Image (cartoon, rainbow, N blue to C red):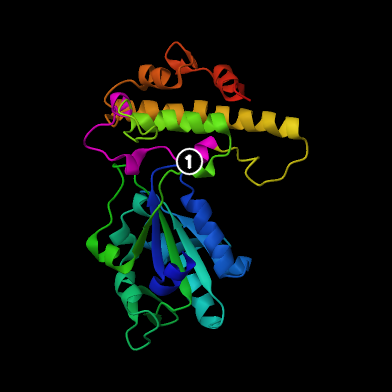
Amino acid sequence: MIDILKDFKQIILYGPPGTGKTHLAEEIAEELTNKKDDNHGLVQFHPSYNYEDFVRGITVETADNAVRYVTKDKKFVEFCKKAQQAEDDKFVLIIDEINRADIASVFGELIYALEYRGNKKKPVSLPYPIEGDDKLTVPNNLYLIGTMNTADRSIGRLDYAIRRRFCFYQMLPDENFIKHERAIELFRAVATLFGRDVYKKEKDADYKILSPDYRWQDVLPGHTYFISKKHSNGAQKDAKKDAQEEVDDIAKQFTYQVWPLLMEYYQDGVLIEHPKSKLEDVIKEDIFNDEDVDLEKVKRFLKSGH
């Protein structure tokens, strides 16, 4: 992954929720910058995020009851300047949820600047000069990592000009990251609703309720929902206590994150049937209280078999 980023300078990690995109981006940033905190940073795009938030803009300041307008560099230009001042170091800027903003508008002339990185003969002109200087060249030692959630169709798509400047790395749900045996079963049960042939049997198709307008690769809840956040760091002090905490964490994540996401998918037409009956058929145990998942029953499910 780091070799890919070194070659292309800009990469977007894309996939459904819960596949560890941001976590991987942060790990790459730390390794590439030798864990120098000042050399890597993160911004998160959102629908109201704009060029003036990301590149350079005019801000309002007050002092001595007077209002003044000041042109200031924002995160991207700040990182460009830091990288230019330390050419032997590497710098990484993570753009989380990159497709939640109007990217063409946020990037503006940076689309051209990314094409001609390091070429001081082809700088771009920014609309807001500082001390008469409106030129910007993106240095070769600044790397960009974007993350993109493919499940949300309401957010902006990347236009082709942006796509040409980035390489793309798909991150899919992977049960190999899940260590708890019953959590793997729970993940597999959810996966069958999306058409994953996890059991390698014809019966898998009977449980599929994913709309033909969607692909499982874009919407299947990822493996991180089925991993205890406390347990994932590998530190173990009390085996019995750790096991209980692991069950509690996974049960809460399934009850308060996975199930609401499945219900949202059902309401939005991603899943064409209510997921309850299919899920019960697959796992062969009752984890529901009426139409909702019951936290204590999920805990019992995870504990059984151990």
Q: Residue furthest bottom?
A: 121
Q: Which residue is mark 1?
A: 175
Is residue 271 found left or right of 132 in the rendered image? left
**Is residue 212 within the magenta segment?**
yes
> What residue is drawn where x is 56% and y is 81%?
86
For label 1, count other residues whose C-alpha is less than 10 Å away and answer few (under 14), some (14-19) or many (20+).
some
Which amino acid type is marked by label 1? Glu
As rendered, which of 184 and 83 lies closer to the eye? 184
Is residue 101 found left or right of 227 in the rendered image? left
Is residue 90 found left or right of 265 in the rendered image? right
Per the rendered image, the range of residues in magenta is: 204-226
**Residue 248 % position (x, y):** 62, 28
> What residue is drawn where x is 53% and y is 31%?
183
229, above or below 72, in the image: above
Q: Quadrant of residue 182?
A: top right
As rendered, which of 134 and 217 lies closer to the eye? 217
Q: How many marks?
A: 1
Mark 1 secondary-structure assignment: helix
**Is residue 279 within the magenta segment?**
no
Please indicate, yes or no, whether residue 148 appears anywhere in the rendered image. Answer: no
